[in-house]
């Protein structure tokens, strides 16, 4: 079935196909680079629980033969596919699977792919050989079950990157099962989009010459060992919030919104009023001593987002203590001279670190990431003051 609106070039083709055929026509791993940080945010326990629940429901349906409504998933095609037979009852669409993006019922799609052993961009781990053998009957029956597929496309003008992002955002609004903390209230899902603190993040990058140390990833929530970047836009956002407002506000702050402080001032007005110089001074000092380790020791804690956010909390306390810009830079130098290797002996003095079961490396011993950051803050302040 082909749906179109008079005066508009965007169309929707609705069809059905066996679930096993989805992978032949549509990409299960494709995600716009501008949306990668969103996918990182979506990779949370709430969504994983929902995917597991969907998988359990699918297995029960096909094994027990229960009656159920057809599943529906929605894809969008970037560029201009070739539409044939628009004037006839039966239409066909020619496109490259690498130009397709899932934009609707994301968790259902992920659950289907996981059960069929297809790798996806979200919760990419597939079933083990043991699980495949155990669920063989369910997989075989599920593979032949029909799924309704809606394909959004524009064969005249073509959908662009902004259109794909817009469709993902609007579909996520109606797909209430998909949990996206820090994102759902935003007006822009692109890592390149403007939000209140973005100018100050760019200023920090410039003031501290972060690019010379490896640069910033604007598309992901956290850096990867395999990359050259040393932090992300999201982590710098959290660092700035913590440096101005402290741990509580840092924990619950959301990128799309400015923050009103207890004083009545907004966070951006404080940063614009000169506070940025405090943050830049400290971070310049911290980065100086770590240039080599950002390259040679990519598994060290100097790349940890929790360490970076803890540095924001350290700055917050040092500014409250009345440190000058020179003193802040020197404090950063002191912490920059620490060994951030995970097997560094000094971590035994940190209240939220403990040796792993093999006694080789130090790991987070706190019961939450917030407590881990606060414990790191306490330890770093002790190092500075000793």
Image: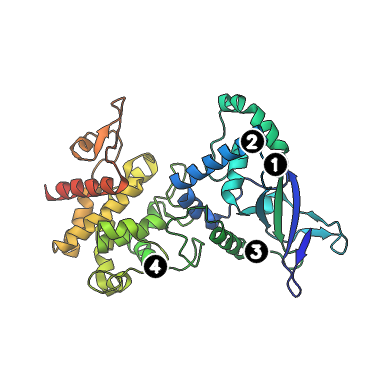
Horizontal and vertical percent position of residue 199: 39, 69
Q: Name the residue under label 3.
A: 160
Gap in Å between the C-alphas at discs 4 and 1?
Answer: 40 Å
**How many neighbours does mark 1 have within 10 angstroms: few (below 14), some (14-19), or many (20 or more)?**
many
Q: Mark 2 points at which residue?
A: 116
**How many neighbours does mark 2 have within 10 angstroms: few (below 14), some (14-19), or many (20 or more)?**
many
Horizontal and vertical percent position of residue 334: 20, 49
Gap in Å between the C-alphas at discs 1 and 2?
Answer: 9 Å
Residue at left offset 64%, top offset 38% = 61
**How many neighbours does mark 3 have within 10 angstroms: few (below 14), some (14-19), or many (20 or more)?**
some
Please identify, in this view, whether the residue under mark 2 or under mark 4 is nearer the observer: 2
**Callout 1 touching callout 2 (CB < 8 Å):** yes
Please identify, in this view, whether the residue under mark 1 or under mark 3 is nearer the observer: 1
Q: In this view, does 85 lie above or below 386?
A: below
Q: Name the residue under label 4.
A: 257
Task: Give the SS element for disc 4.
Answer: loop
Task: Give the SS element for disc 3.
Answer: loop
Task: Give the SS element for disc 2.
Answer: helix
Residue 65 visible: yes
Horizontal and vertical percent position of residue 148: 71, 50
Q: Mark 1 points at which residue?
A: 19
């Amino acid at each position: 079935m082909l749906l179109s609106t008079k005066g508009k070039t965007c169309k929707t083709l609705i069809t059905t196909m066996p679930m096993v055929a989805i992978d032949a026509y549509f990409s299960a791993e494709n995600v716009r680079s501008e949306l990668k940080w969103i996918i990182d945010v979506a990779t949370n326990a709430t969504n994983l629980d929902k995917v597991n629940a969907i998988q359990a429901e699918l297995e029960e349906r096909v094994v027990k033969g229960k009656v159920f409504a057809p599943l529906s998933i929605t894809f969008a095609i970037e560029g201009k596919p070739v539409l044939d037979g628009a004037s006839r009852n039966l239409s066909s669409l020619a496109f490259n699977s690498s130009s397709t993006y899932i934009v609707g019922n994301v968790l259902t799609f992920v659950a289907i792919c996981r059960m069929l052993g297809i790798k996806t961009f979200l919760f990419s781990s597939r079933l083990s050989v043991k699980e495949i053998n155990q669920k063989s009957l369910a997989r075989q029956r599920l593979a032949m079950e029909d799924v309704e597929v809606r394909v959004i496309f524009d064969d005249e003008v073509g959908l662009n990157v902004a259109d794909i992002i817009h469709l993902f955002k609007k579909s996520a609004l109606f797909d209430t099962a998909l949990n996206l903390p820090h994102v759902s209230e935003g007006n822009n899902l692109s890592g390149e989009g403007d939000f209140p603190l973005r100018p100050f993040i760019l200023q920090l990058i410039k003031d501290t010459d972060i690019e010379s140390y490896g640069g910033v990833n604007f598309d992901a929530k956290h850096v990867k060992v395999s990359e050259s970047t040393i932090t992300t836009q999201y982590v710098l956002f959290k660092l700035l919030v913590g440096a101005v407002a402290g741990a509580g506000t840092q924990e619950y702050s959301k990128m799309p919104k400015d923050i009103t402080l207890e004083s009545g001032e907004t966070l951006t007005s404080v940063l614009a009023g000169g506070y940025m110089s405090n943050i830049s001074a400290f971070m310049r000092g911290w980065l100086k001593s770590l240039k080599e380790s950002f390259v040679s020791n990519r598994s060290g804690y100097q790349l940890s987002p929790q360490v970076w956010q803890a540095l924001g909390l350290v700055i917050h306390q040092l500014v409250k203590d009345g440190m000058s810009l020179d003193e802040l830079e020197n404090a950063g130098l002191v912490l920059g001279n620490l060994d951030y290797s995970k097997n560094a002996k000094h971590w035994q003095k940190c209240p939220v670190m403990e040796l792993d079961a093999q006694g080789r490396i130090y790991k987070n011993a706190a019961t939450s990431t917030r407590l881990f950051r606060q414990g790191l803050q306490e330890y770093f302040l002790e190092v500075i003051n000793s």
